[in-house]
Amino acid sequence: MRHLLGEPKSTLRLAYPSPLGLYALAVGLALCFASASAISTPAIRCGLCAFILAAGLPHGGLDLGLLARVAPQRWPRAHLLAGYLAWFGAMWLVWRLSPPAALVVFFIVSAVHFAEDWAIGGQDLPGLGMGAATILAPVLLHRGELSAIFETLGLGAGAAPAADALLLIAPVAMMAALAAIWRLATLAQWRQAAGAILTLLAMVLLPPLLGFALYFGLWHSPHHLRSNMRDYGANADGAWQISVMTAAALGVAGVVCLLSGKALLSGGDIVATFETLSCLAVPHMVMPGLVRWLAERGQASPSQGVLAVT
């Protein structure tokens, strides 16, 4: 997150490389032994959802702590938390009013966020194709399974047309992703290039939920968690914040499941996982830019005390 607050990007990735070996092993084993029929059983599906939440949520656990360092001094952390909850609630309301619109927002926010994993030459924008391909690749070989997930998320009869629409743009995203991988290789960013190849293999060939679980839990989340811990400081306070915020987010996922009206093994796990992730992703991406903008506006006024944004 911190590079969104004005920090250099290159040092984040060099100081804390992602666990490529574990990711490669997991993807390799899944490609060899995982089957769509086994993954589709309710118990396995629920286990994958639990893994996505448990492994993925901690990487946002230091958001408030990092934001507090660049927010105006007169802002208590409760104000930042209120902002997070407001954006969370807004996204949750969009899910209630229009699941298709919520899904579009989730896809856009996720693509932009995942682009950070493939920064090329210290810039996120060239990796946007890879971020989009991470979201869209499953539709190439698993349109039916993706459509079923969309139906569970409330799209109903619009689930199949939504999957068809993604199928139209997925090849474009894949071409952009291949170009990004080539660019990473030419810049000798071998670890990121290898991770990108593994991600495309997982998202294209594996069942969608399994592929996403491996990418989100073993590549994306560790990458950002390590970077955030380096920025905040690997100390007891940081570990406590991560634990508390992760536990709170898991509790929210439980509430979302209850409010969905679906049993846990009858689609409630899917709703709880992806509605929670989407509702958290919006403030996770929006709040850093908003706080930085407010802090910079405050710096323009001598009467307002702010922390320096470095």
Image: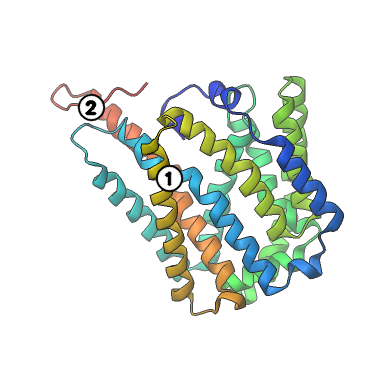
- Left or right side of 287 for 213: right
Left or right of residue 111: residue 302 = left
Q: In the picture, which quadrant includes the C terminus?
A: top left
Where, by quadrant of the figure, is residue 174 drawn?
Answer: top right
Give residue 262's position: percent from left, percent from top.
53, 79
Residue most extreme to the right: 32
Residue 171 showing in the rendered view = no
Mark 1 — residue?
242
In the image, is residue 102 above or below residue 12?
below
Q: Is residue 35 above or below residue 63?
A: below
The residue at the point 38 percent across, 51 percent down is 244
Find out whether the residues at labels 1 and 2 contact each other: C-beta distance under 8 Å. no
Q: Is residue 48 left or right of residue 236?
A: right
Which residue is farthest front? 236
Query: How many C-alpha atoms fall within 10 Å of the one at disc 2: few (<14), some, or many (≥20)?
Result: many
Image location of residue 107, percent across then percent down: 58, 53
Q: What's the residue type where badge 2 is placed?
A: Val
**Which one is closest to the eye, mark 1 or mark 2?**
1
Residue 275 screen position, x and y as percent = 51, 62
- Find residue 143 and report its image quarter: bottom right
Task: For residue 180, say whether it is visible.
Answer: yes
The image's colour scheme reads: rainbow
Residue 83 numbered tag = none
Q: Nearer the viewer, residue 239 or 100?
A: 239
Q: Which mark is residue 306?
A: 2
Q: Judge from the rendering whether residue 82 lies leftward or rightward of residue 220; answer left or right.
A: left
Q: Which amino acid does the dot numbered 1 rest on?
A: Ile
Lower sequence index among marks 1 and 2? 1
Give the image location of residue 232, x and y in percent. 41, 31
When the figure is inspected, residue 67 is found, relative to residue 304, above or below; the finding is below
Under tag 2, what secondary structure?
loop
